[in-house]
Amino acid sequence: MQVENKALKGQASCDETPKKTSKNSSNLPSKDQKANKKPSEKKTRKPRTQGNNGRSLDPNPSQTVVARAKTCPHCGETVNPQRLHATYDKIEIPPVQPIHNQS
């Protein structure tokens, strides 16, 4: 009987303890091992581009303004070499005039 007892104790120690999950311990559900899932298809993104991607510039603007700094706004030094950084359209909408109708 002692031999059987030792054999049973040996079997009990060989048994694996169940893995800790959120159901049997204080682990968070996000730490549980996830079930095997099929790998989902990755969505392809459009490559990002820089620059003017919106409306195209007006080919015949009514006025062209070239704005260049004469002095540095921080230190006051004169600024000589300047290059065009960007070109854009500034559309000014005239003020709305109300229409008065008399009948």
Image: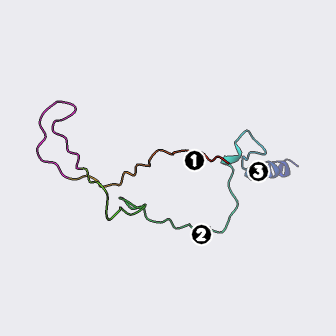
Q: CA distance from mark 1 to mark 3?
A: 99 Å
In the figure, is residue 76 to the left or right of 92? Answer: left
Give the image location of residue 49, x and y in percent.
39, 62
Would you name the residue on which mark 2 appears? 41
Task: Please report whichever mark, 3 or 2, sits nearer to the chain's N-terminal start.
Answer: 3
Count the marks: 3
Q: What residue is shown at x 22% (from left), y 50% (from top)?
A: 66
In the image, which is nearer the foreground, mark 2 or mark 1?
A: 1
Task: Please report whichever mark, 2 or 1, sits nearer to the chain's N-terminal start.
Answer: 2
Residue 78 lies within the magenta run: yes
Q: Amino acid at mark 1?
A: Ile
Quarter-wise, where is residue 100 in the image? top right
Would you name the residue on which mark 3 appears? 10
Give the image location of residue 27, x and y in percent.
70, 41
Quarter-wise, where is residue 53 in the image? bottom left
In the figure, is residue 63 to the left or right of 83? Answer: right
Q: Amino acid at mark 2?
A: Glu
Give the image location of residue 74, x and y in percent.
21, 31
> Dot 3 lies on which element?
helix
In the figure, is residue 80 to the left or right of 88? Answer: left
Circle 2 packing at 10 Å, graded few (<14), some (14-19), many (20+), is few
In the image, which is nearer the foreground, mark 3 or mark 2?
A: 2
Quarter-wise, where is residue 51 in the image? bottom left
Would you name the residue on which mark 1 appears? 99
- The span picked out in magenta is 66-83
